[in-house]
Amino acid sequence: MARRSILLGVAFLIAAFGTTMVVLYVQGIEARATAGQDLVEVLVATDTIAAGESVSDAQDAGKLEKSSVLRDDLVDGALASTRSIEGEVALATVYPGQQILGQQFGDAAGASALKIPEGTMAISVELTDPARVAGFVTPGSEVVIFASADPELYLPDGSTRKLSPYTSLLLPKVTVVGVGTTSVTSRTTTTEDGEQTTEEVPRTILTIAVDQDQAEKVIYASRNGDLSFALRDDETVARAGKGVTASDVLPGAFGGN
């Protein structure tokens, strides 16, 4: 009888331990599933804040408000209040919907001066909204730069031969030091039926810090093709490769599998 009681007690302990482990495992799964999905408070711009505009003026004009975003969507360095930037001015234009970062503001004397990292030079390129990550690129952002082009090969006899259009990594890591004003240009496209459509495309000047070799690549690529920026963080991996052509995107159209 005593032996049976001991066995029952051991069985009960094993069952209790197993139940506890199952509960802990399920809780772990739930915790991982909801990680980064909780809401956090952040300060965002509700209207354009011009370079040189003070934080107090922006507040008085109702251009700053608190908003809740998913933790996964929180930009590194985003502020929840203006406490740390009181008395400062915008160093570059801040656009509606952007989360407010401390590096976007500084002393009035620095509003028109770029903070160029030592050993680099600043050059500017003009990009459309999609090519600059829809306005999320701000001063201090680190980006990957891609180039797209329709290259031509110049032959010794003076003739040219068109090569396949491609997109490829240009620079794996570049710091943005300034975001300029946005202008609107018209872009006309023609369909296969010959119909033309015109749309207004906003373009913004972004200034980046690069060395001489990088500057030459960016200037050449911007004049002979199109540039696209991709936001990166410390864990981003950007590897140089042969690039992508139409046969990589649509292999079936070129006899691939």
Image: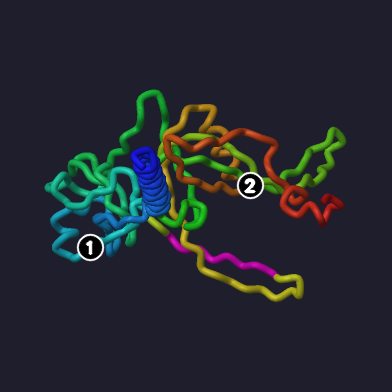
Q: To which residue does mark 2 refer?
A: 148
Counting residues from the start of the chain, the first of labels 1 and 2 encountered is 1
Q: Residue at x 43, y 39 (%)?
A: 233
The part of the chain drawn in magenta is: 183-190
Location of residue 96 with respect to 149 vertically, above or below: below
- For this rendering, which residue is in front, 160 or 54? 54
**Residue 85 horizontal/vertical position (percent):** 17, 46
Q: Mark 1 belongs to which amino acid?
A: Lys
Location of residue 131 with respect to 161 vertically, above or below: below
Give the position of the N terminus as an image quadrant: top left
- Report if the CB atoms under discs 1 and 2 are less than 8 Å apart: no
Is residue 115 in view? yes
Q: To which residue does mark 1 refer?
A: 63
Magenta: main secondary structure equals strand
Location of residue 149 with respect to 50 vertically, above or below: above
Packing grade of label 2 (10 A; few <14, some 14-19, many >=20) is many
**Residue 18 horizontal/vertical position (percent):** 41, 45
